[in-house]
Amino acid sequence: MTELPKGKIFLASDRGHTETGWFRSYATFNFGAYQSEHKNAFGDLYVLNDDTLAGGKSVSLAVESDSQIFLLPTVGAIRYKDDNENDLLLEAGQYLPVFLLKNTTFQVFNAYEDDLINFIQLWFKAPVPSVQKITEPVSFDIEANKNRLIEIFSIPVSSPAPSLFIGKFDGRKDAMINLVGNANAAFFFVLEGAFEVADRLLETRDGLALWDIKDIELEALSANAILLVITIRI
């Protein structure tokens, strides 16, 4: 029998849950009032939140540590504002990378008056550059690159900062992730559908951490399945 690589599954049904009349948040890792000994950070990745915001509403968030943050709308569009007077609009098919100092506050607004939106937050503990220059939202196209993972963010392989991949797959299509440079671990998060990753079954909004591995096989088990992959060093 083939030995499974070292890993841990984070089931969608076991996530932390916070909800008001206009905001719903699911936390894969410990966040805010949700604290569990089994949901500690994965290396420098310490927040992976799946958030839904009602029309015309906003949410304010305080950064716990010096961080590099990625915001990824999956449905609709969000408006981002922070203490540094940045004000940007980003839509599904785009992401925004920002560096924020500890105790900095930022706000996310629903760009629509009547429709729900959904967005993913990724927070990594990281030193903040002395010159904090925010970039414009970065666009990507999973429809034009179907059935493969596309790299939407990367840095030189000598750096320990994360690389991000996303892909949309037809059922029974497969792919391979090869960890390069300093990366020795990966986190998988299913946005839609179902996948088998390193012989583990993952369904919508499940996560999987793998480490001490270089080559990772994955296969989509449903049509139009969407997967987010983060490669890091732990």
Image (cartoon, rainbow, N blue to C red):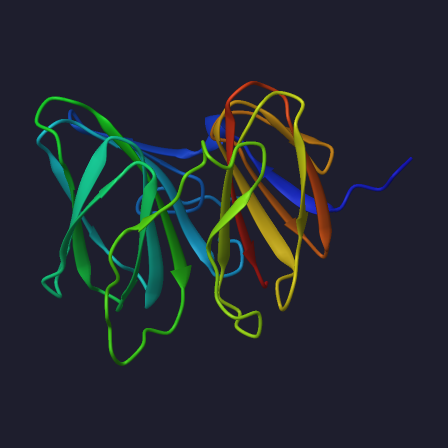
Toward the viewer: 55 or 91? Answer: 91
Q: Does 68 sit above or below residue 189?
A: below
Q: Quadrant of the N terminus?
A: top right
Residue lying farthest to the bottom in this orientation: 130
Asked if residue 116 shows in the view, the reply is yes
Q: Quadrant of residue 55?
A: top left
- Residue pushed farthest right? 1
Residue occupying image coordinates x 61% and y 28%: 195
Q: Tell me the residue at 62%/68% (across/down).
A: 182
Label total for image: 0
Q: Quadrant of the C terminus?
A: bottom right
Is residue 37 at least partly visible in the picture?
no
Residue 169, horizontal then vertical, whole percent: 56, 28
230 vs 125, nearest the viewer? 230
| In the displayed structure image, the side of residue 137 where residue 159 appears, left or right | right
Please give left or right for residue 124 compared with residue 217 in the image. Answer: left
Q: Is residue 172 above or below residue 136?
A: above
Residue at position x 62%, y 62% from top?
183
Where is residue 181? Give x, y as percent: 64, 67
Residue 110: image location, x then y, percent: 15, 35
x, y (%) of residue 151? 50, 51
Quadrant housing residue 64:
bottom left
Compared across the picture, whether 188 is left or right of 192 comes to right
Viewer-side residue, 166 vs 232: 166
Q: Does residue 19 appear left or right of residue 26 in this picture?
A: left
